[in-house]
Image: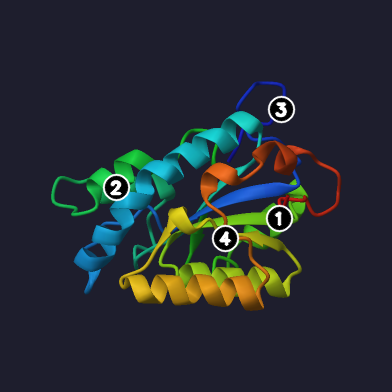
Amino acid sequence: MASRNADLHGYAPDKADGALLLIDVVNRFDFPDADALLAHARPIAEPLARLADRARKAGVPVIYVNDNFGRWRSDFASLVEHCLEPDAPGREFVAKLRPEEDDYLVIKPKHSGFFSTTLGTLLEYLGARTLILTGVTTDICVLFTANDAYMRDFGLVIPEDCVAAVDEDDDRTALKLMRRVLKADVRPSSEIDLEALAISTGNRARVRD
């Protein structure tokens, strides 16, 4: 969990209008179709790492929402180490995106980050009303989490350069669907105003121009 010292620059605050979610980026990529997914995931690693760094510096909470991959007795640190083992195909991807000490960590058992997790309680505590969703895969876990967030009246930002799917067509189709149906803002990560999301007003942050 994050530090409670909101005065230290770069530490996640107790309250903020927005939060950055990294979905399933701690991943071994050793399942069917993993090679294709990893090929499309590698290009998002750098922009996502930059976005996470900007969020930390701006005071926007960074939340890792990650599948447990059937390792029910593992804590998050053990999961990270498991995905960084020498035989893990995704170890270089994970190394670029591994959590920092003051990030928030949520383990999910199914596709949505909200299903049977503490995510909803954490977001309520933070006061976040706008969520930046990133990670893999665009058409499954990102989409399921976005659907549940929309049903809970969160504003959604899903930067197109920070999500990936097994198939590029599926990625584009899911982004188009989330933009049309879930009213998601899919602008590139470099255009997101993180300072606006860091301000705690109790209202949904404005991210559009």
- Tell which residue pokes out farthest to the top in this image: 8
Q: CA distance from mark 1 to mark 4?
A: 13 Å
Seen from the viewer's position, the closer of residues 191 and 71 is 191
Seen from the viewer's position, the closer of residues 31 and 191 is 191
- First in residue order: circle 2 vs circle 3: 3
Foreground label between 2 and 3 = 2
Foreground label between 1 and 3 = 1
Task: Decide: few, some or many residues near mark 1? Use Cα within 10 Å; few <14, some 14-19, many ≥20.
Answer: many
Element on which disc 3 rests: loop
Q: In percent of the image, x 64 and y 35: which residue is there?
A: 12
Give the amino acid type for the residue marked by disc 4 in the picture. Val
Q: Which residue position holds label 3?
A: 6
Say left or right for 51 vs 196.
left
Badge number at residue 130 = 1
Quadrant in the picture for the N terminus: top right
Q: CA distance from mark 2 to mark 1?
A: 26 Å
- Tell which residue pokes out farthest to the left in this image: 87
Element on which disc 2 rests: helix
Q: Which residue position holds label 2?
A: 93
Give the amino acid type for the residue marked by disc 2 in the picture. Phe
Which quarter of the picture shows residue 60?
top right
Give the amino acid type for the residue marked by disc 3 in the picture. Ala
